[in-house]
Image: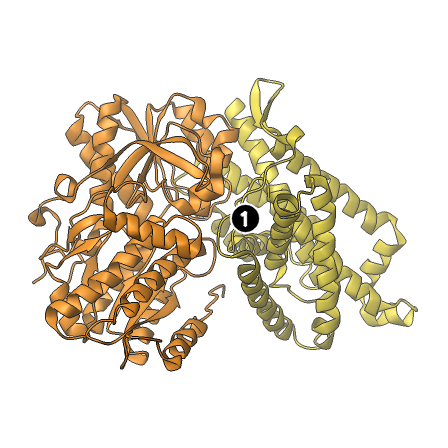
Amino acid sequence: MTGIAAALLNSLDIGLLLFIIAVGLNIVFGVLNIINFAHGALYMLGAYLGYSCMNQLGMPFWLALAVAPLAVAALAVLVDRGMLRFIYQREISDSLLLTFALLLVLNEAVRMIWGTGIHVVEPPAPLQGTIVLPGGLNYPRYSLFVIAAGLLALAALWLLFNRTRLGKIMRAASLDRDMAQLLCINTRRVVTCVFAFGAWLAAMGGVVAAPMRAIDPGMGDKIIIESFIVVVIGGLGSFPGALLGAVALGLMHGLGGRFLPDVNLVLPFIGMALVLLLKPHGLMGTGGKA
Amino acid sequence: MFELTLKRALLALTAAGALAAGPASAAASGDPIKIGGLYILSGSAATYGKFAEQGIQLAMDEINAQGGVLGRPLALLMEDDQGKAAVGIQAARKLVYQDKVQALVGVDSSGVALGLVPTMKELRTPLILTHAATPHATGKLCNDYTFRISVNEEQNMRAAAELAAKTGAKRWTTIGPDYAFGHEVWEYFGKYLKKFNPDAELMKETAFPRFGAEDFTPFINGVMQNKPDGVIISVWGGDLVNFVRQANNLGFFNQGFQLMFAVGAATEVLTALGPQMPEGVWLGTRYWYAGYDSPRNEQFVDAFKKKYGVPPSYNAEGAYASIYAVKAAIEKGGKADAESIAKALQGLTLETPTGQLTLRKGDNQALIGPTWGRTGPMNDADKIRSLVDAKTFTGAEVTPALEDTGCKAS
């Protein structure tokens, strides 16, 4: 029984970390109608900056969690103003090419700044080690923190989209940008904010992941593949879809790895194939605009 | 779509620039002899390629400073194989046909080696493997152009099985990456364990997470649930860093299992982990910088530390030795073209940091053994765990007879 409980909790921490990252990808697509290939690189940048904040500048984890994602969001503002704004009106394939180029630049920059070596950071002291849960299950504290962080992000995003004016503006801009502009919404500023917010979420995921994942120059490529699986399963541009897809993928990794170790490799791809066959726009997708 | 082909044109340019500037003194002059390097230079395992590149560069600097080979300097052209067979083959073709290299050294991944080795007959250029360990490269796929200067997985697992049999642990399982390497480790470990300890049991329940899995928790929990006596672990690179930290968290190291890491003593990983690598587990490696008490090794380790500030990893040593092998082959045959080098490499004996080493005529595998040891206290100067009870196996002890390798070339 504890075996299943551990696998379920593990699925949840894998899934909710993926949610934090993939939801950024989805929001950016929903509002800007671009698929950001560099999203994984922004996640990696967050993790490396977090590493520098903690291990080189001696900041505590919580400060790094505040600083690193903000720095990445600031960079995203520059990227949006300097690069992306020129292609918003163009074909989606142009944005794919441009963000792919950005990915290459960021990957190479990370290698030039931090080298190719593997780095690790420690979880903050209260989150180190394991805790005994009711039922006698021994579980890593940091994994529980990741679950909590994921749930917090979920709640905050739901409130943002459904209860705030800013959220309504973002949804309006995603439904019809021209109409929103006619209604005196500064869509240009909204677009920049949304792109920076997506980058902030990716970097947040990177700092949260840093204490439990090796920081290496390939971490961005790994996560972007996972994030794409999440959005294909959940539906591109859909907020609940990102949650559903992330948790589904978490379950495939967590339960699949534990109980079906021989086929766990192909599970995500079987899942993706099934979704594409039965619901081509993803479980919650609408086929374009959210 | 994710093949991040970033050509190492810069490196080639640097090499060309250095040559154009002209070496200062009695150093080599004339047309450089070009050697191609094929390693993982991007992504998670890029640190392995980096160390290989450093090893090659050190060897070339030493050789060129002493007048080069046949009076000509050596030059390096690096390509990123990304750990993917298709990319590796394409890069090898480019190096041979376009850049006109006379020898290739490299490859980190067994997956790349399995794809590349049969291609060498078409390229008619020698390839010296310095890291990839699949026994088939010098076994059933062997050919006149493929050599290996490093320990292969059969040699490594024979040594591991001998130690495993001595621990008395009876029920063994494995955790390894789900591709050629992980499965071969288990296959050869099992084969030799049965030989040394016929009572040993190879469990049906094994764990093969995908390479780059990031979260190994489900697999670690699965193994702990099955209560083995011993586990052979072939996870490597960044995966191994993740694995050890997650295993620490789950109490995997306090279960009383005998734990053997097939390629655990990689300085790339040990440096990252520091004291988080627990004490008392068995680590294997193709080369351990403190495992050889010889002037040649001391000179190599000192020179490497002086140039790069860290001790050389096994990958650095393999790459370093391969350049000296090319040099020795050119001097033996008196010619610097690919065919002559390939011919001269067969049966070649040379001095390397691991001692006198012979590339066996027939399968072209170096007669060489791994080092295995238990993790000891931290080495504060090098900031990594030391190895205690370290034993370096000789090639004679662990290399199967030629007729048992499956090699039927020449």
Q: Is residue A55 left or right of residue B258?
A: right
What residue type is disc 1 on?
Ile
Q: Chain B, which colour? A: orange
Element type where label 1 sits in the image: loop
Q: Quadrant of the C terminus of chain A?
A: bottom right
* Residue B43 x, y percent position in the rendering: 47, 57
Among the chains, which one is yellow?
A
- Could you classify mark 1 by the number of other residues whose Cα lies within 10 Å: few (under 14), some (14-19), or many (20 or more)? many
Q: Could you tell me if residue A210 is visible in this image?
A: yes
Q: Residue at x 63, y 75 (%)?
A: A94
In the rendered image of this protein, does residue B73 appear above or below residue B227?
A: below
The residue pinned by badge 1 equals A215
Q: Nearer the viewer, residue A22 or A67?
A: A67
| Percent of width and height locating residue B39 | 36, 61
Q: Residue drawn 75% across and 64% down?
A: A77
Q: Which is more toward the observer, A93 or A37?
A: A37
Left or right? Give the position of A223 relative to B44: right
